[in-house]
Amino acid sequence: MQPIVDTVVIVAICVLGAALARRLGFIAPLVLLVAGLCLSFVPGVPEIRVEPELVLIGILPPLLYVAALQTNLVAFRRALRPILLLAVGLVVFTAFITGFVLHALLPEVPLAACVALGAVVAPPDAVSATAIARRIGLPRRVVVILEGESLLNDATALVMVRIAAAALLGSAVGFAEIAGEVALKAGGGLLLGLIAAVGAAWLHRRIVDPLLDDAVSLLTPFVVVIVAEEVHSSSVVAVVVAGLYLGHRIPYLLSPTSRLQMDAVWRLITFLLEGVVFLLVGLQLRDLIGHLETGAATTARVTVLVFLTLVAARFVWMYPATYLARLVPRIRAREDRPPPAVPAVVAWAGMRGVVTLAAVLTLPESGEVPGGYPRDLFVFVAFATIVLTLLVQGTTLPVLARRLGVHEDAAAEDALAEASVQHAASRAARERLEEHADGAPASVVERLRALTDSRANVAWERLGSQEQETPSAAYGRLRREMISAERHVFKIARNEGRISEEVLNRAQRELDLEESQLTRSDD
């Protein structure tokens, strides 16, 4: 009974924290992190220990899968070079730089252990970085690069953690073994992800029930990660590849009802999982401090040093990675040279989160390592890094982006592109209508022609002035008032027993669907 109560309380706190964040205009992960920190010191709050399997198999796969589903595959491929430079090159660079710096501060700790900690704290978090990037309106290419980095860097970090842990336990690890394991895990994950995506696409194509579509979509990331772990390939790569493939093909695989319902289901699951993760990170603090044996001064020095090294390493990497590649004529001709402010903002957008939480919990116990190492210190430093990067970088990134002028107002460009394509779509719709209009009532055909013209006009109206109410906005406002009146009449009829609950539900669903379309038009 108690685990169920604890789960309900945690979810309730996540919902309240997210509501408070929206009310105050803050980022929800930051509010939940602070809430967890405060609650961890409240008497009576139970100590919650997060198992690595819970994060690696229960939380991380669906979050990565949803992020991959929502990623523009075309834009992802165009930005593949900077994404790989960050997701692979920067993670390896950060892991070794952090490891060497930490080993210099604590020479009695094995270098392999220091590199393992460097790999743990190297990958930024997909949730916090992209949430902030989208909210503050960073350029679309920057958002794609941050999303792509967060999708792929997890695999690099987890492989490095396992290799460093093997070296820490005394296993001989050479360059050939490392290259072979990376190639095997990445290649196996890529192949498994493609196979799983093709299988899931085959199922989606043949399913007509939206509930079954939702069930298949929910099962896909968990099945992929379980199979990947069983065959010892990269589960992260497999889940991301499956998500990218299916996300690109969803318009061809699912019915409109399935797409709408699946989007709502995944939004709810992502909302709850993200909230639970950051709340759990905050709740770990009391337990970590209670088990910490290292002195307060040493702990503070190590924590600050690791944080500063992470920030510095990302800046040191960003500028050469951004500008040296453009010395190649083909790349210089294909890509514009960004101003120095852009890599500065990307470098500062290095908040840590879920993967760091999962990776540090997989480190071997001190008693398993010959000579031992301060595992409790490393776990505390990893959690402290998550807290510091979210509180320091997460809160200041919007200010930095505004001060440096790194933003993109793509509303007008998007509206023009939408209006142009909608015009072509409306022309195609009218042509198809004329082809199949024989025998149909003239009033029906005329009504459909008017509907097509209205959709095209709405798209062009978005290019106009926002200072006065457009015809489509007036239509939406007045139609919502009419829907409200209709809904009220049906409720009164149900209360008086003139119609059944089933009739009310059917009428209410139709009105709700129409009102949701009006809301989409306003957005």
Image (cartoon, grey):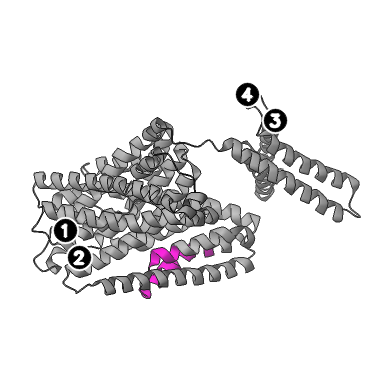
Tell me which numbered mark, 3 or 1, is placed earlier along the sequence.
Answer: 1
Observer able to see residue 12: no
The residue tagged with tag 1: helix, strand or loop? Answer: helix
- Seen at 65% across and 58% down, the residue is 255
Q: In the rendered structure, which amino acid carries the disc numbered 4?
A: Glu
Tell me the crowding category of disc 2: few under 14, some 14 to 19, or many 20 or more residues within 10 angstroms, Cα based: some
The residue tagged with tag 4: helix, strand or loop? Answer: loop
Q: In the rendered structure, which amino acid carries the disc numbered 2?
A: Pro
> What is the number of the mark on residue 467?
4
Q: In the rendered structure, which amino acid carries the disc numbered 3?
A: Leu
> What is the number of the mark on residue 364?
2
Mark 3, residue position: 478
Report the mark closest to the observer, 2 or 3. Answer: 2
Residue 299 belongs to the span the image colors magenta: no
Report the mark closest to the observer, 3 or 1. Answer: 1
- Seen at 39% across and 47% down, the residue is 323
Residue nearer the viewer, 81 or 11: 81
Mark 1, residue position: 375
The residue tagged with tag 2: helix, strand or loop? Answer: loop
The residue tagged with tag 3: helix, strand or loop? Answer: helix
Tell me which numbered mark, 1 or 2, is placed earlier along the sequence.
Answer: 2
Residue 235 belongs to the span the image colors magenta: yes
Range covered by the magenta-colored residues: 215-239
Observer able to see residue 460: yes
